[in-house]
Amino acid sequence: MVRVKICGITRGEDGLSCAQLGADAIGLVFYAPSPRNVRVEQARAIMAALPPFVTTVGLFVDAQASEVQAVLAQLPLDLLQFHGNEPAAYCGSFGRPYLKAVRVKPGMDLVQYASAYAGAKALLLDALVEGVAGGTGQGFDWSLIPPHLPLPVILSGGLNPANVAEGVRRVRPAAVDVSSGVEARKGIKDAAKIAAFMQGVRDASL
């Protein structure tokens, strides 16, 4: 089955709800301009509430290496997600597996981009909204995704319970990533929307 990551968790009860409803991973945002930004103490409490076997992903946007290292010194994150213009050497320098996010636009050579980040576990494909790093709720044209990329694809950008099944069927990603599409308000998740999203993924995976 397609894996599911729910990003922008800010409360322990939301992280636990995600896990109980079947999410494989949760995302913790360490990017101050984001309305879903968490402090280390917040993130530690969220992680403590999770059951075993839920992957914790730390999201950074063009952070200084020292900032990432400071978070890693305090939190046992499983995966890193880089959502800015970080070069491959930087992404691979922290001793953790990583995902590289790319905001897709027409004319972009995603095959070349994936090759440049050959050390990544996957490419996370998101919508391009100028001036905003992610979590916009905006989608993009899935036909821009080449059928054969040298890295697994995590489909993101504007996914919600109503369209995730179509996205899984059309793109056949390794995983999907959702944030605003399962929220009651920014940073606060809605358990009913998460359940519906998970059902959409299951329906498309049959």
Image (cartoon, helix red, strand yellow):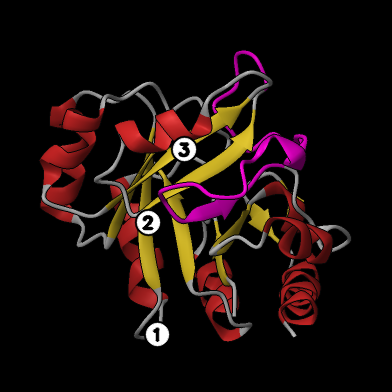
Q: Residue furthest top?
A: 131
Crowding at dot 1, Cα within 10 Å, few <14 / some 14-19 / many 20+, comes out as few
Residue 149 painted magenta: yes
Residue mark closest to the camera, 1 vs 3: 3
**Residues in magenta, as a range:** 129-157
Q: Which mark is residue 118?
A: none
Crowd tier of the residue under label 3, counting other residues whose Cα lies within 10 Å: few below 14, some 14–19, many 20 or above = many
In the image, residue 5 sits, relative to residue 135, either above or below, namely below
Q: How many labels, in total?
A: 3
User: Does the stretch in magenta take in 57?
Assistant: no
Is there any visible trace of residue 137 in the rendered image? no
Q: Is residue 9 above or below residue 109?
A: below
Separation of residues labelled 3 and 2 (CA atoms): 13 Å
Q: Residue at x 54, y 50 (%)?
A: 148
**Closer to the camera in the image, 121 or 177:** 121
Considering the whole magenta stretch, tell me its main secondary structure: loop
Q: Circle 3 — which element?
A: strand
Residue at figure coordinates x 24%, y 55% from the top left:
97
Left or right: where does residue 184 sit relative to residue 12?
Answer: right
Residues at badges 1 and 3 in contact (C-beta under 8 Å)? no
Q: Nearer the viewer, residue 21 or 14?
A: 21
Residue under pointer 3: 101
Question: Which one is earlier in the sequence, the residue at label 3 or at label 2?
Answer: 2
| In front: label 1 or label 2 | 2
Q: Which residue is mark 1?
A: 51
Q: Position of residue 74 (x, y in %)?
A: 15, 53
The residue indicated by pointer 2 is 57
Task: Decide which of tag 1 and tag 3 comes sooner along the chain.
Answer: 1
